[in-house]
Structures are given as structure tokens and as C-alpha cells.
Image: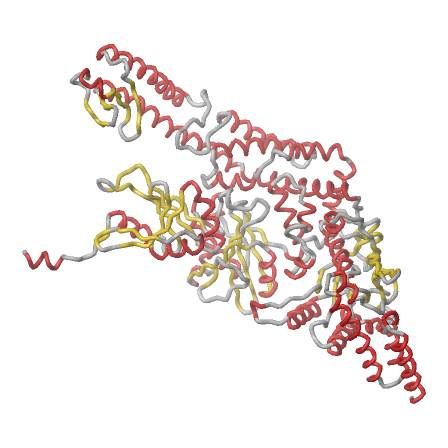
């Protein structure tokens, strides 16, 4: 016996709680398991280390069995959503394991995983940005063919992209992909934190066809590679969010040819998103659906004239009728997220309070759609009846959850009304019983109370306990009082609590019935949501156009680009000074503008301005100009500014050359090219040679409308060699040694950059400026001495000479030297 005891000494054993955790965690190896313990969600072992690192929470350890200390980190249940959001943004998946009221064994509470959340399957209102789509994407490629099946669970949209592998990858880069599903071992098509690998047997057309038939009742006609992507996508949804599949829309091919593809560089250069961006300027939207559509419209401007003109007509309607605009704006102001609330209803995640919000949104949205005659009257009537059914069924101020009841109005269900009557009568019976026992015992301070652990009880002060009758059974002793039960109280408790529990259960069933009715109308709600989004965007664009005096551009199928009095929309709106407008005219005879002039003279702003006006016109909006004729454009390319690509070990100049190479390979005659300072990242001669060769290539091989800003003044000679090129310059005015930037782009070429003046404005020390002026004069003299003496070089030198900076002696020396060289030649 002693030997046996010795053998067992020191053996490690888990507590029942740890055993429970390990059993549940084994079912969710991919997810961080949030394990409900009291007021906290705890994590253990490797999960705790990840949580501690991402959330900055202290990693502790806790004894959980003989000889066992377990690493742990916890988050408060009441603030869980905030922390979960941060974990999702870091690319992690989360499984929420909640404790129930049921027992597992003698003391352990039963715990179950109630929800699995991944970056691409999140539905929570507090986590999802309202103005951004949230795509879960399954991607696969074979040879040069690529396919992506994708879903935004929050709206129910299901899309697929199919085509050249490079084009599919580029388009994914323009969408807000939250999570990517790939065959195991695949290189990801874009940089993203949340990547899930799956075995290749789920990426099969057979698996895709089987699941598509299961979800939709039939198999849509799509290429086999698309079918295989759907196999992986729907398999993942069945695994992580099976109850969200019911509300998915039918798959739609994502028509890449409908939109102008904007690369990431162009989006950044034109400041499309972020603070003081085009989105920040145009976002007057009242609804979340409108905000999402506006964001999409900016990153995906229309390519086809018909689409552009359709939105133009809507914008013009509101622009010309401000009374109508104000009325529609008032109706849309109370419309919340129809799409996402319907998706949450389908998943059973829509709270009673938000269900009532959905009903009120439907009333506002149907009124607006009716006013604009944007939806068949019978469909609007159906949705109004749905909204009325919801508002008639729910109390005026429902709670945020179902746990305590109090959701359904009286008079909706006879059984529920009876159960509530029993509860109300029970309250009266409890009061009567309390009064009866006070008289029987002579204890006037006796009172009836309730706690979930013991149910109803009598509470008697300790000083009065000698008066307590024998049929009072003690259940709890407190510092100043004693608690008791009687058979009569126990019987009444069972009747009351039974009625309460049954009422809550029945309310839940009635509530689920309302949600089912909402889901049954999801196709109509989805259609209404799209109509509201389009109205909202058109209204927002008209509001901005009205405030800043924009004009409706003429969209034509020809070549010429003509802008009179064009303005940069964000500079005009966000800066506290008058903006100087400029004209732009590019046609088949003169489509390549070389722009020279001083730093800070407005060249880059002018380039961006033209790009933004063309983009806004293709969105179907009005533009900041006095008049504009905009040709249909297939691409907008920008190369303005430069920076290292440190993540790939690429220098500034290499990054610049990559961008230029991309432009030259993809631009067509219908493209707009905005190029600034090509070649500045290398030596002067190399840079000038590259800039010149690029210009000639665009002129002779591509024929794209081009604005080419450069600090190489020599490049202006290109206009003499090719009539399709012409010179523009940023105008300045010099008065008494001061340089005034006029911010006007005018015909001609500049011969000075005014770099030292800009350096003085930037606050460089006087000693540095004076030394720079001295060196400038020396470099100019050295350049003269290096020239070969021919007339062309002398002329070029004279053009570049800063005469105002020369002393009389320096000017005389240069004049003698020039005379000697000319006579010597």
C-alpha cells in the first residue's frame, strides 16, 4: 500500500475546470478561445500569450491542479467587443465560450461556444466600420487563370471574379478584403494579416457544385475554377458561420470592365481616402449604405457613359430642386443599416432594440423611395406592412437582449398575456402572504425577498428570530438577519417562476418568428437598400456641388479634355484662402503638356486637380470648374512624389522606375497620365535622358493625354521637335527681390526653379542660404568653363543663369569668357 502511495506522489492532475477548457479548446484549435469565468473572458496557455502581446494585458499564472500553474490573461466581459476588435485586426480568429446556468457535474457550470468570429465573418455593429465592406475571399489560380469567390456576410453580397491572374489580384487589392482563404502552400495574392489555409480537396469544382446546390437549390453556370473557389468559401462558412448562409444573395460576377481600375499609388496620390481627402469632402451621406457606395464609387469610378449619365441625372435632379433634396434628406436621416440589420436578423444576432430600429428605417426608406418613384408601389406596400407588423408586435422601448423578456406587446399572444397575468397576480399574492405572516408571527419587520440562488424567502431581523414559527425552514444566515422558507411560499414561488420562465421562453419564440418574417422579405429589403444608397450618394454629391459651385461636366466619347476654371476640390474646401483656378486643354493635336516652373508654384496641385476632376466626372458627379468636357477615360495613372519601398528593399529611384514601367505597359490612348519629376532620383544627365525618352515613348507609341511636370528645363525643347507637345509653366512675379507665386498655369517654359527662395521661406539659417548662393554662382561659372563653346550650349547657359544674383565683377568675368569662347569657335 505504501509503495502505491509513493508512486502517486507528485503526479500532476488538472482541475475539472481545466479539463473542461482543454476539451472545448481541442474543438477550436484555430481560434483564440475566450473562456467565460465570472465577469471575465479568460485565455490560457498559448492563447494567453497571444492576447497579452496584442492587447498589452499582463500575463499571469494560476494554479489549476496539483503541480500545475497555467499562463492566463483575461478581458472584462462588458468590454469584450473592443478587445475582440483588436484581435481581429491583428488577424486572429476568436471563439466565444459562454457559461450557462446548467451544471456539469456537482459544482462546474456548463460552458458552450456560442459564436466563432473571424476577420471575414464578423457581424457585430460595434466592430464593423459602417462605411466599409468586409469581404471574405477564397482565391485560387491555375496557370495564368485566376478566380476569387467572395462574400460580405454583413450585407449578404456574394460575388466572384474570374480572368487573368494578374487582373484578379489587382482587383482584390482595390477591395476591402478582410480575410483570405488559400490552398495550403499558396503565395497570397495581396498583403493581408488574416490568411487561412485549407487542404486542396475543398478547392474542387465538385465540392463547389455540391455546396452551391445546397445553398441555392441549383448550380449557377460559372467556370470550373470559380466553382472550386466557391467550394472553399462555402465550406469555410459552414464551419464558422453556418447560420449566416440562409441570407446570402445569389452569386453575381464582379464586372471589372464596368469601372476604371485605380491602383494603390493613384489612390494615395490623389488623396482619395483619409483626413482632408476626396471621401471626407464628398461624404454628406445620411445612411451607412450610402457611405459604403460612395467609398466604392470613389475607388471604382464608372467606365461606361450610360452608368455615368444615370447618376448624373439623379445628382442634377437634387441640384436643381433643393426643396426636394431637403425632403429626401430628412427622410433618409433616420434610416440606419438596412442591409446589415437584415443580415443580423438572419443570423439571430439582431437585438430587439435594433429590430425596432429596422422597422423605423423601413418606414423612412419606403417614404423616400415612394417620393422618387424608385420602386414598384406593391413592393413598397409589402415592406411598409412588414414595418408596421414589427412596430405593432414590439414594445415602444424594447431591451437590448432577450434574457429578461419584456419585448412583445400585450395583446399579441393570448398565452403570453395569461402568463403575464399570473406573474402580476403572483406579485399581489406575495404581498398578501407577507402581510399574513407578519400578523401570524407578530414580526412587523418581516419581508419577502428574492435572489436567484434561493428563490423567494422571508427575511427576519436576528433580534426577532425567537418569534419565528417551527414551519419556517432556515436557508441562509446573514450578519443582521436570517432567511427562511415555508411550504406555502415554496408553492407560490413555483407558480410564479414557472409562469415567468414560460413567458420568457414564449417571447423568444415569438421574437424568432418576427425575425423569420424579416428574413423572408430580405430580397425586397436588399433592393430597397440599394435604391436608398444611390439616392443618398446622389444627394450628397448634389449638396457638395451646391455649396462649392460645381458644374455638370459633359461626358463624351471623343478624345479632347477641356476644363475651364478648374479647381482642386480639397484645397479649395479645406484651405482658408481663395483658390486660383486654371484651365486645361488637351486634344489629338496637342495632348502632351510639359510643365515647368518653381517649386511651390502649384505644378503638383494642378496635376492632382485635373486627375480629380476627371475621376469625379466618371463617378457621375459634378466637378469644380466653370465648364468641363470630359472624354471617357479607361485609366488614370499618377507618378507624383517618391518614397522608398522599404518592405521590399527597393530604393526611391527603383520604386519610381517600377511605377513608370507599369504606366508605360498599361496606358492606352484613352488613359490620363499625370507625371511629376520623372528621373529626379538619379544623376542629372541620367534623369534628363530617362525623362526625355519616356516623353518620346508616350508621344510616339501610346498617345495618352499627359501632364508632365519636370524640373529639367531642357525638356521644354521637346515642344519644338514634336507639335503634339507644348509647354506650360507655373507663373511667378518678382518684386523688389521678393518672389510671389501666382499659382497660375500659363503657356511657356520657365528658366528658373527659385529653389533658394523656397529654402529661405522654409526657414533655413541665413548662413546656409548665403553659402548656397555663393556655391550657385561658382557652379554656374564652372558650367560655363565646361561648355564646348557652340551657340546652343551658350544659349542654354544664358537661359539658366541667375543674373540678379551676380555681382558686377562676376557678370563682367562671364561676359569676357563668353566672348572668348564664341570668337574661339
**Residue under the image location 32 percent in, 39 percent down:** 100
232, above or below 358, in the image: below
- Its colouring scheme is secondary structure
**Hey, which residue is sitting farthest top in the picture?**
439
Residue 719, relative to residue 117: is it above or below? below
Residue 254 lies in what quarter of the image? Answer: bottom right
Residue at image position (38%, 44%) is 114
Task: Where is residue 472? Give x, y as percent.
Answer: 19, 20
Residue located 49% across and 27% down the image: 394
Q: Can the viewer see residue 670 in this picture? A: yes
On the rendered image, what quadrant is the N terminus found in? bottom left
Q: Position of residue 712 (x, y in %)?
A: 79, 72
Camera-side residue of 710 and 536: 710
Q: Please identify the residue farthest to the bottom as the structure is shown.
A: 824
Is the residue 764 above or below the residue 456 in the image?
below
The quarter of the picture where the C terminus appears is bottom right
In which quarter of the view is residue 416 placed?
top left
Q: Quadrant of residue 494?
A: top left
Q: Residue 805 in the image: x percent, y percent?
A: 85, 71
Amino acid at each position: 500500500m505504501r509503495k502505491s502511495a509513493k508512486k502517486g506522489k507528485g503526479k500532476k492532475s488538472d482541475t475539472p475546470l481545466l479539463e473542461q477548457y482543454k476539451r472545448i479548446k481541442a474543438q477550436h484549435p484555430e481560434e483564440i478561445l475566450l473562456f467565460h469565468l465570472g465577469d471575465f473572458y479568460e485565455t490560457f496557455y498559448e492563447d494567453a500569450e497571444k492576447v497579452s502581446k496584442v492587447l498589452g494585458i499582463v500575463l499571469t499564472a494560476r494554479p489549476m491542479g496539483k503541480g500545475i500553474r497555467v499562463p492566463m490573461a483575461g478581458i472584462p466581459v462588458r468590454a469584450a467587443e473592443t478587445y475582440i476588435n483588436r484581435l481581429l485586426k491583428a488577424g486572429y480568429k476568436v471563439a466565444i465560450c459562454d457559461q450557462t446556468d446548467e451544471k456539469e457535474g456537482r459544482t462546474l457550470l456548463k460552458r458552450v461556444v456560442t459564436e466563432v468570429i473571424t476577420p471575414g465573418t464578423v457581424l457585430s455593429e460595434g466592430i464593423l466600420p459602417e462605411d466599409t465592406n468586409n469581404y471574405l475571399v477564397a482565391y485560387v489560380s491555375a496557370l495564368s487563370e485566376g478566380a476569387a469567390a467572395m462574400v460580405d456576410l454583413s450585407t449578404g453580397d456574394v460575388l466572384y471574379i474570374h480572368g487573368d491572374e494578374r487582373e484578379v489580384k489587382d482587383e482584390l487589392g482595390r477591395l476591402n478584403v478582410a480575410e483570405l482563404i488559400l490552398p495550403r502552400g499558396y503565395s497570397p495574392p495581396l498583403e493581408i494579416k488574416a490568411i487561412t489555409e485549407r487542404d486542396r480537396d475543398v478547392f474542387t469544382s465538385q465540392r463547389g457544385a455540391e455546396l452551391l446546390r445546397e445553398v441555392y437549390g441549383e448550380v449557377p453556370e460559372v467556370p470550373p475554377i470559380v466553382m472550386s473557389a466557391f467550394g472553399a468559401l462555402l465550406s469555410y462558412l459552414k464551419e464558422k458561420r453556418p447560420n449566416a448562409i440562409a441570407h446570402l444573395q445569389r452569386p453575381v460576377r464582379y464586372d471589372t470592365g464596368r469601372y476604371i481600375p485605380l491602383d494603390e499609388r493613384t489612390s494615395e496620390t490623389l488623396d482619395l481616402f483619409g483626413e482632408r481627402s476626396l471621401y471626407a469632402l464628398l461624404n454628406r451621406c445620411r445612411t451607412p449604405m450610402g457611405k459604403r457606395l460612395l467609398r466604392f464609387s470613389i475607388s471604382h469610378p464608372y467606365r461606361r457613359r450610360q452608368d455615368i449619365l444615370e447618376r448624373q441625372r439623379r445628382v442634377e435632379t437634387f441640384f436643381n430642386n433643393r426643396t426636394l433634396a431637403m425632403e429626401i434628406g430628412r427622410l433618409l436621416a433616420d434610416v440606419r443599416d438596412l442591409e446589415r440589420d437584415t443580415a443580423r436578423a438572419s443570423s439571430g444576432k439582431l437585438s430587439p432594440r435594433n429590430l425596432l430600429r429596422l422597422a423605423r428605417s423601413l418606414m423612412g426608406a419606403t417614404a423616400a423611395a415612394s417620393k422618387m418613384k424608385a420602386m414598384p408601389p406593391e413592393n413598397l406596400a409589402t415592406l411598409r406592412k412588414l414595418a408596421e407588423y414589427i412596430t405593432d408586435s414590439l414594445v415602444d422601448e424594447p431591451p437590448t437582449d432577450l434574457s429578461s423578456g419584456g419585448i412583445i406587446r400585450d395583446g399579441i399572444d393570448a398565452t403570453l398575456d395569461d402568463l403575464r397575468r399570473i406573474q402580476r397576480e403572483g406579485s399581489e399574492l406575495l404581498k398578501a402572504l407577507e402581510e399574513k405572516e407578519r400578523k401570524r408571527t407578530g414580526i412587523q419587520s418581516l419581508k419577502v425577498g428574492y435572489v436567484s440562488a434561493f428563490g423567494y424567502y422571508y427575511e427576519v431581523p436576528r433580534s426577532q428570530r425567537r418569534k419565528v414559527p417551527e414551519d419556517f425552514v432556515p436557508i441562509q444566515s446573514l450578519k443582521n438577519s436570517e432567511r427562511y422558507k415555508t411550504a406555502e411560499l415554496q408553492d407560490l414561488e413555483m407558480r410564479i417562476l414557472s409562469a415567468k420562465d414560460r413567458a420568457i421562453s414564449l417571447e423568444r419564440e415569438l421574437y424568432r418568428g418576427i425575425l423569420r418574417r424579416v428574413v423572408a422579405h430580405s430580397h425586397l429589403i436588399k433592393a430597397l437598400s440599394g435604391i436608398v444608397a444611390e439616392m443618398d450618394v446622389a444627394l450628397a454629391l448634389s449638396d457638395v456641388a451646391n455649396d462649392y459651385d460645381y458644374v455638370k461636366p459633359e461626358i463624351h466619347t471623343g478624345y479632347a479634355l477641356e476644363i475651364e476654371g478648374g479647381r482642386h476640390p480639397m484645397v479649395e474646401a479645406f484651405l482658408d484662402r481663395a483658390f486660383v483656378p486654371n484651365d486645361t486643354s488637351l486634344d489629338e493635336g496637342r495632348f502632351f503638356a510639359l510643365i515647368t516652373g518653381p517649386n511651390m508654384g502649384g505644378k503638383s496641385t494642378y496635376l492632382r486637380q485635373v486627375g480629380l476632376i476627371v475621376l469625379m466626372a466618371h463617378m457621375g458627379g459634378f466637378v469644380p470648374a466653370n465648364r468641363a468636357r470630359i472624354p471617357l477615360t479607361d485609366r488614370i495613372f499618377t507618378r507624383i512624389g517618391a518614397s522608398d519601398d522599404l518592405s521590399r528593399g527597393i530604393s526611391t529611384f527603383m520604386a519610381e522606375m517600377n511605377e513608370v514601367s507599369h504606366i508605360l505597359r498599361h496606358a492606352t490612348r484613352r488613359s490620363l497620365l499625370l507625371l511629376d519629376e520623372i528621373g529626379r532620383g538619379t544623376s542629372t544627365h541620367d534623369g534628363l535622358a530617362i525623362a526625355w525618352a519616356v516623353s518620346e515613348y508616350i508621344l510616339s507609341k501610346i498617345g495618352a493625354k499627359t501632364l508632365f511636370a519636370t524640373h529639367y528645363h531642357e525638356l521644354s525643347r521637346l515642344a519644338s521637335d514634336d507639335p503634339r507637345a507644348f509647354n506650360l509653366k507655373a507663373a511667378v512675379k518678382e518684386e523688389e527681390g521678393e518672389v510671389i507665386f501666382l499659382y497660375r498655369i500659363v503657356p511657356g517654359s520657365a528658366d528658373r526653379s527659385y529653389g533658394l527662395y523656397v529654402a529661405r521661406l522654409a526657414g533655413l539659417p541665413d548662413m546656409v542660404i548665403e553659402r548656397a548662393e555663393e556655391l550657385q554662382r561658382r557652379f554656374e561659372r564652372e558650367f560655363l568653363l565646361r561648355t564646348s563653346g557652340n551657340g546652343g550650349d551658350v544659349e542654354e547657359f544664358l537661359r539658366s543663369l541667375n543674373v540678379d544674383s551676380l555681382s558686377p565683377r562676376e557678370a563682367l568675368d562671364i561676359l569676357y569668357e563668353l566672348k572668348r569662347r564664341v570668337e574661339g569657335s
